[in-house]
Image (cartoon, rainbow, N blue to C red):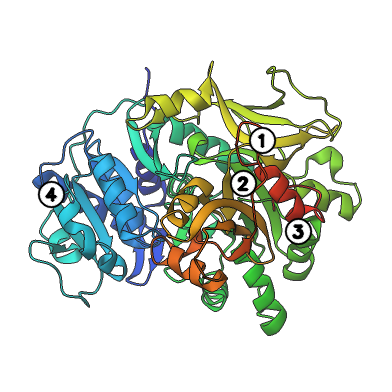
C-alpha cells in the first residue's frame, strides 16, 4: 500500500520508539518525546480553534526555542504551511513577507516583538499574533501569550488533515538578485527525502545530541527538526549565539553534533584558544555557506579535535546537495590533501544529480580548471517560488535547478566554487542581495552611482563593499553612508566599507562590470568567493 511521505511521520516514529527519551532541552526545562508530542497536539487544537485549515500559512519569528521546534509539527497536523522568518531582518521586511505569503497566524518571540510593533497596522492578512515568552513585555490589544493560550487545549491526539506528499509544507523566504525576497515552496516530499539523504551523510542516530546553533529558519538549520527527530536524537535549544554559551551547553549536555556558519565556528576557535574548555565527547561540526580555506579545516580538526563536514546547498534544494566527507579510497592521503578536499563543496549526496556545465549545457572537464555553473536535479528541488512563476522559470530548466554558482571539478569529482554568477554575497552564512543594498544607497541624495560587491573578511568570510560615485556638490564620508544604510535595512546587509571613485567600469552597453571591481579586492585569492 502506498504511504505518502509526510513529515508528521518523523515525530510519530520518535514518540513510538523513544517516547520516554529526552527530546528537547530548553530554557523552560527538559521534555521527552511524549511530552513534546502532547504540546504539539495542544498547538494543533489551538490552531483549529482559530479556524486554521489545510493550506493556510502560519508564520514564525523566533530564535531556536522549544516553541519554534514544536511549531513545525503542530502546523503540519492541520495541513498548514510553515513560514519561518529570518530574525535579523527589519520591520519593513517582515511586513512584506507576511503580506506576500498571506500568513494568517503569526507567532513571535517576545524578544523580537518590538520589531513588529512599527508595522502591525500594515499587516493585511494576519488575524492573530501570539507571543512566546515569559510575559516580560506589554502586548498590544488583541495579542495573546502563547503558554496561557496553549494550556486551554487538550493534549489528546489530533485528527489530522489528509496530506499528500506533494502538498507544500514550508515557504522559506530567501534573498535574491531582484532585491525583494522570494518565497521558496518546499513540499513534504522535498523535505522527507532530503532528510533521509542528509541523515545518512551526517550519520545521525539516536545517540546524537544536537545543539541548535544555526537558526531553524536558516537554510542549513531549518531541516534539523526533521532528521534529528526521526532518529530520536536530543535537541538542545540556544537563543544567544555566543561562544561561551555554546561551549557551556556542549559540556553540560554532551553535545555530539552542531550546524553553524563559518563565522560562528571561527569565533569558537578564538574562544578555545583563549580558554581551552575541556570537551570529552566526539563532535561533528557541519558547515554550510562559503567554503573555508584548508588551514581553517586543519585548525578545527587538530585544535578542537572535532570532525569537520563541509556541505553545500541552497534553500531551493531543501537545501543540501553535496558533502565533503572523505571517501574510503582517499583516507590514506596526506592530511594536507584531505583538508583541501574537505574545504571544497564536495560530491553529490544520495538522491542528487549535481553537475558543473558550460554555457552549452555540457559538463566541464574534471581537470580543476574549466569553469562552469553548478546545476542540480533532485527530489529536494523546490516546487517553485510562491506567487512568482517568472522567477521559477528563470532558475529551473528541464528539471534542472541552476544555482548561479560557478565552479570547477577535480579529477576525483569534487566540486569547488570559484565565483558567483548571481550578484549574491554570503556573509556569515546569510544571503545578501547586492541589488537590494544598491537600491537603498541610491536613496542617499549624494549618491550618483553605486555598486555593491563582496570583499574578503576574516570573520564573516565576505562582506559588502560599496563602490560609490558621488553626486557633484555633496560631501559625506564612509561612516556617514554606512550609517545611512543601517538606518534603512538589517545591519548585516549594510556595507562594512566604502570606496569612493570617479567612475565605475562599464561595458559598451553601460552595464557596470562588477567582475573588474572584484578583481582588485580578490587578486590575492585563488577564487572570487570566501
197 up-or-down from 517: above or below: above
Give the Cα distance between marks 1 and 4.
50 Å
Mark positioned earlier in the residue sequence (3 or 2):
2
N-term mark: 2 or 4: 4
Count the marks: how many? Answer: 4
Secondary structure of the residue carrying numbered label 1: loop
Q: Which residue is mark 1?
A: 507
Q: Position of residue 436 (x, y in %)?
A: 46, 49
The residue carrying mark 4 is 127
**Distance Cα–Cα, label 2 vs label 4:** 42 Å
Label for residue 203? 2
> In the displayed image of the protein, which residue is found farthest to the front?
473
- Residue at left 69%, top 36%? 406
Which of 200/13 is in front?
Answer: 200
Q: Sequence order check: which comes first, mark 4 or mark 3?
A: 4
Q: Secondary structure at mark 4?
A: loop
The N terminus - image quarter:
top left
Disc 3 target residue: 297
Picture residue at 87% right of the left edge, 54% below the top = 335
- Mark with earlier residue (1, 4): 4
The residue mark sitting in front, 1 or 2, is: 1
- Left/right of residue 195 with respect to residue 299 in the rendered view: left
Q: Which residue is located at x 59 percent, y 61 percent?
A: 256
Dot 2 falls on a residue whose secondary structure is: loop
Instruction: Rate crowding at label 2 as few (under 14), some (14 to 19) or many (20 or more) other CA atoms within 10 Å.
Output: few
CA separation in Å, label 3 and label 2: 20 Å
Which of the marked residues, 1 or 2, is nearer the chain's N terminus?
2
Amino acid at each position: 500500500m502506498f504511504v505518502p511521505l509526510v513529515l508528521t511521520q518523523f515525530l510519530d516514529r520518535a514518540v513510538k520508539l523513544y517516547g520516554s527519551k529526552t527530546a528537547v532541552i530548553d530554557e523552560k526545562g527538559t521534555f521527552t518525546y511524549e511530552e513534546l508530542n502532547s504540546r504539539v497536539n495542544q498547538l494543533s487544537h489551538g490552531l483549529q480553534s482559530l479556524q486554521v485549515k489545510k493550506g493556510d500559512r502560519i508564520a514564525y519569528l523566533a530564535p531556536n526555542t522549544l516553541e519554534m521546534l514544536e511549531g513545525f509539527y503542530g502546523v503540519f497536523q492541520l495541513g498548514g504551511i510553515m513560514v519561518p522568518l529570518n530574525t535579523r531582518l527589519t520591520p519593513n521586511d517582515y511586513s512584506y513577507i507576511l503580506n506576500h505569503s498571506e500568513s494568517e497566524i503569526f507567532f513571535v518571540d517576545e524578544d523580537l516583538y518590538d520589531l513588529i510593533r512599527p508595522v502591525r497596522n500594515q499587516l493585511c492578512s494576519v488575524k492573530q499574533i501570539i507571543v512566546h515568552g515569559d510575559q516580560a513585555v506589554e502586548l498590544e490589544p488583541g495579542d495573546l501569550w502563547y503558554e496561557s493560550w496553549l494550556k486551554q487545549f487538550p493534549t489528546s491526539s489530533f485528527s489530522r488533515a489528509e496530506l499528500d506528499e506533494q502538498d507544500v509544507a514550508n515557504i522559506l523566504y530567501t534573498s535574491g538578485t531582484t532585491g525583494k525576497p522570494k518565497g521558496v515552496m518546499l513540499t513534504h516530499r522535498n523535505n522527507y527525502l532530503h532528510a533521509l539523504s542528509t541523515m545518512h551523510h551526517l550519520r545521525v542516530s539516536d545517540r546524537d545530541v544536537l545543539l541548535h546553533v544555526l537558526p531553524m529558519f536558516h537554510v542549513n538549520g531549518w531541516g534539523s527538526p526533521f532528521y534529528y527527530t526521526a532518529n530520536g536524537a536530543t535537541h538542545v535549544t540556544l537563543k544567544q549565539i555566543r561562544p561561551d554559551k555554546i561551549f557551556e551547553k556542549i559540556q553540560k549536555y554532551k553535545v555530539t553534533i552542531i550546524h553553524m556558519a563559518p563565522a560562528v565556528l571561527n569565533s569558537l576557535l578564538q574562544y578555545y584558544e583563549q580558554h581551552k574548555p575541556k570537551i570529552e565527547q566526539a563532535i561533528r561540526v557541519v558547515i554550510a555557506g562559503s567554503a573555508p580555506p584548508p588551514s581553517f579545516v586543519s585548525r578545527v580538526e587538530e585544535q578542537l579535535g572535532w570532525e569537520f563536514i563541509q556541505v553545500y546547498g541552497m534553500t531551493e534544494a531543501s537545501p543540501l546537495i553535496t558533502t565533503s566527507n572523505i571517501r574510503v579510497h582517499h583516507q590514506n592521503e596526506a592530511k594536507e590533501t584531505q583538508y583541501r578536499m574537505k574545504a571544497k563543496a564536495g560530491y553529490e549526496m544520495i538522491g542528487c544529480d549535481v553537475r558543473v556545465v558550460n554555457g552549452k549545457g555540457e559538463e566541464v572537464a574534471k581537470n580543476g580548471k574549466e569553469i562552469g555553473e553548478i546545476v542540480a536535479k533532485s527530489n529536494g528541488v523546490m516546487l517553485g517560488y510562491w506567487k512568482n512563476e517568472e522567477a521559477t522559470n528563470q532558475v529551473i530548466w528541464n528539471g534542472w535547478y541552476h544555482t548561479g554558482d560557478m565552479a570547477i571539478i577535480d579529477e576525483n569529482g569534487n566540486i569547488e566554487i570559484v565565483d558567483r554568477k548571481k550578484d549574491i554575497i554570503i556573509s556569515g552564512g546569510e544571503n545578501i542581495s547586492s541589488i537590494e543594498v544598491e537600491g537603498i544607497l541610491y536613496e542617499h541624495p549624494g549618491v550618483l552611482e553605486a555598486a555593491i560587491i563582496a570583499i574578503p573578511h576574516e570573520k564573516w568570510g565576505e562582506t559588502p563593499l560599496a563602490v560609490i560615485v558621488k553626486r557633484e556638490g555633496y560631501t559625506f564620508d564612509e561612516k556617514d553612508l554606512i550609517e545611512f544604510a543601517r538606518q534603512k535595512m538589517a545591519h548585516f546587509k549594510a556595507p562594512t566599507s566604502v570606496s569612493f571613485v570617479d567612475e565605475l567600469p562599464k561595458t559598451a552597453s553601460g552595464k557596470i562590470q562588477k567582475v573588474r571591481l572584484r578583481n582588485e579586492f580578490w587578486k590575492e585569492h585563488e577564487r572570487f568567493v570566501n
